[in-house]
């Protein structure tokens, strides 16, 4: 059984719901910079989705600048620039 629920009736597609869930964890400090994000198979088990959906969620995180991918190693949290630098 899936650990996290995906709302299949929601207007947002499942991959986006997964990515937003991970983004919330990043912004809350639950996931640290340069730490790995769960792999596609882990996301499949956690959310009860197909591999393509899990991979698309990871790709979305990379495209949005929240993560970076290292081939054959995984996807990792990317350092985010702060909106306003202070002196």
Image: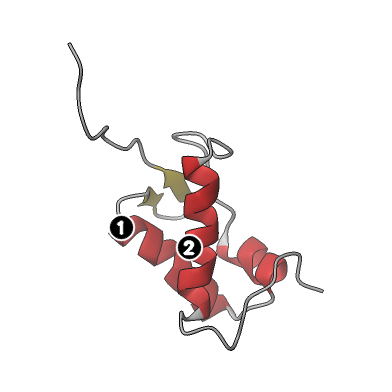
Q: Quadrant for the C terminus, please.
A: top left
How many C-alpha atoms fall within 10 Å of the one at disc 2: few (<14), some, or many (≥20)?
Answer: many
Q: Which residue is drawn at 57% across and 77% down?
A: 51
Give the percent coordinates (x, y) of residue 86.
20, 17
- Residue 73 seen: no
Circle 2 residue:
19
Q: Which of 55 and 18 is in front in this view?
A: 18
Q: Which of marks 1 and 2 is nearer the N terminus?
A: 2
Q: Which residue is drawn at 46% across and 68% down?
A: 57
Cβ–Cβ under 8 Å for marks 1 and 2: yes
Left or right for 85, reference 73: left
Give the percent coordinates (x, y) of residue 48.
69, 76
* Res. 64 mark: 1
Q: Distance between the residues labelled 1 and 2?
A: 10 Å
Q: Which of 32 and 21 is in front in this view?
A: 21
Give the percent coordinates (x, y) of residue 65.
30, 51
Give the percent coordinates (x, y) of residue 22.
53, 54
- Residue 12 seen: yes
**Element carrying mark 2:** helix
């Amino acid at each position: 059984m899936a650990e996290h629920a995906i709302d299949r009736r929601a207007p947002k597609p499942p991959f986006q719901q997964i990515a937003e869930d991970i983004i919330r964890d990043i912004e809350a400090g639950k996931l640290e910079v340069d730490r790995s994000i769960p792999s596609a198979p882990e996301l499949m088990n956690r959310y009860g989705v197909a591999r393509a959906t899990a991979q698309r969620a990871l790709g979305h995180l990379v495209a949005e600048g929240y993560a970076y991918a290292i081939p054959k190693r995984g996807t990792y949290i990317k350092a985010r620039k702060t909106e306003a630098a202070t002196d």
